[in-house]
Image (spheres, grey):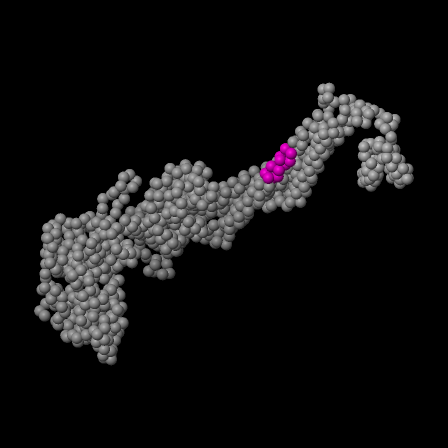
Amino acid sequence: SQHESDTKFILILDRRLDTWTSVKTTLQKIAASFPGNLHLVMVLRPTGFFQRTFTDIGFRFSQEDFLLKLPVVMLSSVSDLLTYIDEQQLTPELGGTLEYCHSEWVIFRTAIESFALTVKEIAQMLQCFGTELAETELPEDMFSIERILALRTERYCQLKEDITAVTKEGNLLLSSFEEPSSGECSQDQQQERPGDWETVNRLLGQLREMETAFDGFWEKHQLKMEQYLQLWKFEQSFQEVKNAIEFLMGQQAELPDTGDSIPQVKQRLKDLDHFDGMAQDLIGKAQVVILHGHQLAANHHYALNLICQQCNELRHHGDLLADDIKRKQMRLQKTLDLHTRLQQALQCCDEGAYLLANQQMDKCQSKEGAQKALQEIERFLESSSAYLNYDPQALHYDFESVLTPELKCQMQAVQAKLENVRSMFGSRQSCFRKLLDKHVRPVQLVAPRPENPPRSKSPLFSPKHGKILWSWPFLQLFPFLLQIEVMHDYQEKRNSLQYFISDSDDSLDVLKGHVINELIETERVYVEELFTVLTGYRAEMDNPAMLMLLPPVLRNRKDVLFGNMPEIYDFHNKIFLHSLENCLGAPERVGCCFLDRREDFQMYEKYCQNKPRSESLWRQCSESSFFQECQRKLEHKLGLDSYLLKPVQRLTKYQLLLKELLKYSTSCDGVQELQEALVAMLDLLKSVNDSMHQISITGYDGDLSELGKVLMQGSFSVWTGHRKGPTKMKDLARFKPMQRHLFLYEKALVFCKKREDHGDGYDKTSSYSFKHFLKMNAVGITENVKGDHRKFEIWYSGREEVYVVQAQTVDLKMAWLNEIRKILFKQQELIKGLDFKQCLPSQQWRSSSQARARSSSRSPPSWVTGEKQQRASISSEENDSERTSPVMLDSGLVSPQNKPHRSWPGMSQSLEICEGLEEWSGQQYLSNCSDTEEEDGNQLSPGKYKALADCKRRGSEDLLVKNGDEIQLLHEDGEGQWLVKNLNRRKEGWIPVQSLQIVVGDCRFRNAKVAGI
């Protein structure tokens, strides 16, 4: 500043006790490095004799050098110094009276310089912050904008706090200069401080100016950021509403504005009303967005022009949508009016035709009858004049805007029919008037002679009105009159019924739409709930911030608690929900939607099987603060256990919704698929239920999954018996049935004993203790047992073991028999397929088969387990390791060395077999007994038999034996082949013994032979 440039310094060097060399060195340093403007340098020269002399001499010789650079005055004593400087400006050491404390001066100077440095740093921080605000690009999403605004606001508040702190420090420093110390500070010191006060005050002024500028800049920036955020929200709302309006306009454009019938037009009006409701909602949302835009414009938003433009665009789109819907509504309403008038005209024609048809011509022969009939016609014409006498040109002019080629054809047809009806009424009136003119002699009215005599005399009898002869043109115009007289009352009821059905079809469509909407909406809610559980609970188990609340028992066990819920969520969210939403406009595809994803729904079986483990784990930690905190964050009213039940509840909900949808889709497309989908979902529920029972089986040494799928399960009363082996005392004493829980697998029948529930409260569980199982390839059944219709037999390995099973109901028994029969039929088809592959027509095949048989006898194939194979029935109650049975093959084939008595005993196709088995099983076969005669009876022997199944010729598709044929077994070739003669068809051929046993059934039934053989 100008004041600083005018300020000059006076330096006093006290060298009274020093040497000339020191004085010279100091002057040189001052001349070379002193930064300020020097007014004068006063030197108190050394006082020693020699040093003073040296100083005088040296200064004299060097005076010119110093004067060129510094104005130096050499003083001999302190008194000489007082001639230059007032004593009040000098300290006592220099002969003055100024009280000066150097340490205090240093403290003040340090404080002033530190304050100045802090002010400078604040200025730099404000400059950097302003540069950052000006140069940083704003993001494109609302969340990031709000986050940046919050961060910048926080930083602004921090800078404001720093400025306030520095200002407070400056004011405190300034007050120290303004307050004189009591008695400790002299007047000279007080005169020294105004310079420091001015410095601090100047710095405080600069600080206030920076703060004011910074506040103004921040207010503008904050306003701009807030307006930018407001604009972003406005544009987002604008785009959403605009897209929704454009989408609705596209859907509305696809809706036709005409129709070919009244029901069609009414349905389209209903659809349009639905669109209108949606449009009004959208227009209301658009009005809210437009109002928001006007508020922004009123607040002087920087994007005023853009906001106004978008408001006008949104208003324009809304007006277009409303106008289009209104225009279509007017066209459809006008079309409906036209259809109504045409229908009224047709109805008038029908009523006129009925009137003419119901007039009894016999009674009209008299004058009174003719007069009455003529009056009826006149009254009808008077009441129907508006329809019979309408102007087609006027009608065409009134409805020209909605006329289509179809409507024009309908108008022409109605016009032609009206003209015919008018001509018929004119003819009938003319006829009656002539009759009235000739009332003197009654005249019998007959129909005019047509060109085709057979058609002109077509009498139609009415139970009410007798015979009427109608002219052929009349019947051509109203063909329904050919049936009206004969079925008058029935036809009226039928017409009314058809009308009711037509109306009910519309209502059924509405109800069906409600069901589909409920299916889709509940599916969306279900997906959202699964997402909430997975993110709000399962994901939080991996959140480091929540680990302190997580119970130790839950660590690394989220797969147990939640099962395969993520897999279920991915399936519904990515696949099934979108498939259902695509069915919104095509309800007939709902069934296919379920059927196409039938296999995917099997994942619910895994979830339900894990449910007991999940519930057990939940009960251990349900009161954990972790779940309470997660529930609080999600604002759920129900706990996690309620949401873990959602998949099970949803699975049961599907079949209920499918039933409702099927109820309203009786005559629509896709009914078959809906029925199949319902059956599939019910089967899935049954499979899930069966699998839940399966996981409670204990004591089985092996993998139950190897037995195939669980087909059925249930509790039964069971009696058991054995044909061979020593009789056990417990079998003789077992008159009461055993209570067993049976599981029917694809490959085995498992017997278990149901254990009582153990545990307390929620821990109560049911378990099934494994007893034994029967392989299905060695099982046979007897469907009826004497004494109780609920009983049936399951026999095993050629009746070595027999189990009498009693179901709770006959229906349950039949259901089990059907499932077992299906398994046995599949095995029969497998056996037939293998037999046909082995049957070749040439003798060369027989020779090769003999060679194979010989090699087979030397080295059994891999599917033969041995001559003394252990029974397939494994029991935990009995030790039967010493007992053996004939070789049982999974494929149903046998080796020549061990010929079984039957290859597949489950042939329930024949009533003869069932009745024989029933008779044989009625002998109270509940204990171990030996029946050698029965065993011998199983051997095939030559003779005549009645075929109980079909069989083809070996190596050919030709049918050798048909069910019911009489056949004769001639002889066996030693290789398991029988020569069979069909006595009905006069054919002969070789049949393997396995297939032959199926054809003739159980050889015990000698009464199945043909009588007399």
- Image quarter for residue 746? bottom left
Identify the residue shown where x is 29% and y is 56%: 703
Looking at the magenta stretch, what is its main secondary structure? Answer: helix
Identify the residue shown where x is 39% and y is 48%: 559
In the image, residue 194 lies at what x, y percent? 77, 26
Judge whether residue 151 is colored magenta.
yes
Query: Which residue is the extreme one toward the top?
Result: 183
In the image, residue 873 lies at what x, y percent? 20, 58
Identify the residue shown where x is 17% and y is 63%: 885
Left/right placement of residue 185 relative to residue 659 reads: right
Give the number of marks.
0
Q: Quadrant of the N terminus?
A: top right
Of 53 and 1008, which appears nearest the observer?
53
Magenta region = 149-162
In the image, residue 688 lies at what x, y percent? 31, 50
Of 794 and 303, which appears nearest the observer?
794
Identify the residue shown where x is 21% and y is 76%: 854
Q: Is residue 545 visible?
A: yes
Of 361 and 590, which appears nearest the observer?
590
Of 45 and 532, which appears nearest the observer?
45
- Image quarter for residue 368? top left
In the image, residue 1004 lies at what x, y percent? 12, 64
Left/right placement of residue 477 relative to residue 724 reads: right
